[in-house]
Image (spheres, rainbow, N blue to C red):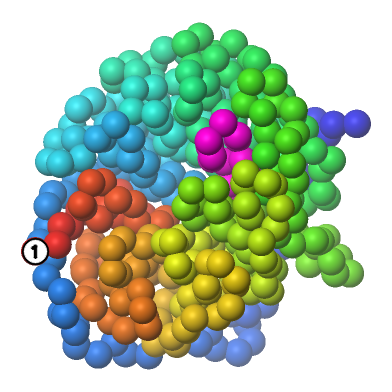
Amino acid sequence: MKPSSKAWMARTACLGLLALAGLSACSSGTKKPQPAELPPVAALMGTRVAWTAQVGAGSEATAPVVAGGRVFAASTAGTVVALDGATGRDVWRLNLGTPIAAGVGSDGQTAAVVTQSNQLVALADGRETWRVRLPARAFTAPLVAGARVFVLTADRTVTAFDARNGARLWAQSRTAEPLVLSQSGALLAVGDTLVAGLSGRLVGLNPVNGSVRWEAPIATPRGTNEVERLVDIVGPVSRIGDSVCARAYSAAVGCVDAARGNVVWSRAAQGTTGVHGDDRLVFGADAEGRFQAWQRASGEPAWSIDRLKYRGLSAPVALGRVVAVGDNAGLVHLMSREDGSEMTRLSTDGSPIVVAPVLSGDALVVQTRNGGLYAWRPQ
């Protein structure tokens, strides 16, 4: 029997309480490890600020997205913006008047967010076009593709809506685990398949009717309690063609062939943020901030660095010959994709960068917790 949304909210809150209890225990015991002092900036590559903008305070679930030459971003307070990706100027800006829990998703025309009151809201040309109430909370940005809006909710249900009017088209549910992870998951299109992270699996769905085409486990729940068994897929994921690589929360990193629906490799890895990569390597940070690279084809370790430990690293993004990752001090570290050596370091407003950087054309774009949007281009 599917749990009520109230039950799911209680279970999610319970997980938050467990996390707070852990933090309290740590604060009363051993002093939290401190990061090493950073050396002077290497500055082995030139960059310039392309533009800056402000959207308002954000969270791990309000990540910017690039579509149709625009950068879409949101604040937890309720503001949604569409910016020109080349100049950073407002194309449109709208305050929904209600806090936002997850977003933004967009295909360049329709944008979608989920509010903290469990409403899915669709926007176009700076105005609201429709909204519908969801049966459970959502922490993952909606996916807008193929004239549909897809939503992954915390009860591990994927639902499709008509992007024109919000009509519910189908829903695919999965047997619920006792706890849910209040963190962005995986929801993306790969060819004509909708790929969603459900528990520790990537699942391929038919976007027309929601039927399951394949399931590929990145990690299998193990452990003696509900927290140890929590292995939800966390976003973002790395897609190159049919290859989709993802992290299972605090359990493993692995890659799946989305054309065949089989696991290519899976390797134990104790991280809590998503991964990104190129056609050769997959990159990500573990829970302490050790930054690692794996061979995309085999999962064999390529390299790892320790100099960014305890800096609260975001998920990364790979661009050209470098990998970019943000930290809790508002710094963006650009590293060589070949060995992790520092290429340069960029500064923002000093507030944490808690979501992965994104690419807008040739510009690297980051959003800080205080709501600053910064774009840099190579010189």
Quadrant in the rendering for residue 247: bottom right
Quadrant in the rendering for residue 311: bottom left
The residue depicted at 26 percent of the width and 27 percent of the height is 93
Horizontal side, residue 8 vs residue 334: left or right: right
- Please state, as top left, top right, bottom left or bottom right, where the C terminus lies in the image: bottom left
Binning the other alpha carbons within 10 Å of mark 1 as few (below 14), some (14 to 19) or many (20 upward) gives few
Task: From the top left corner, tell me how far across and down residue 355 is, in percent.
Answer: 42, 55
Horizontal side, residue 320 vs residue 377: left or right: right
How many discs mark residues in the rendered view? Answer: 1
Task: From the top left corner, tell me how far across and down residue 365 is, in percent.
Answer: 27, 52
Up/down of 142 relative to 370, above or below: above
The residue depicted at 70 percent of the width and 43 percent of the height is 203
Residue 280 in view, yes or no: yes
Horizontal side, residue 4 vs residue 343: left or right: right
Q: Which residues are magenta?
A: 183-197
In front of the other: 302 or 222: 302
Task: From the top left corner, tell me how far across and down residue 343 is, in percent.
Answer: 23, 78
Up/down of 144 relative to 298, above or below: above
Magenta region, main secondary structure: strand
In front of the other: 67 or 306: 67
Residue 34 in view, yes or no: no
What residue sits right under mark 1 in the picture?
Answer: 379
In magenta segment, residue 190: yes
Task: From the top left corner, tell me how far across and down residue 129 is, in percent.
Answer: 41, 12
Quadrant in the rendering for residue 234: bottom right
Q: Say which amino acid is labelled 1.
A: Gln
Q: Secondary structure at mark 1?
A: loop
The residue depicted at 32 percent of the width and 90 percent of the height is 37
The residue depicted at 50 percent of the width and 87 percent of the height is 33
Up/down of 253 relative to 164, above or below: below
- Please state, as top left, top right, bottom left or bottom right, where the N terminus lies in the image: top right
In front of the other: 224 or 259: 259
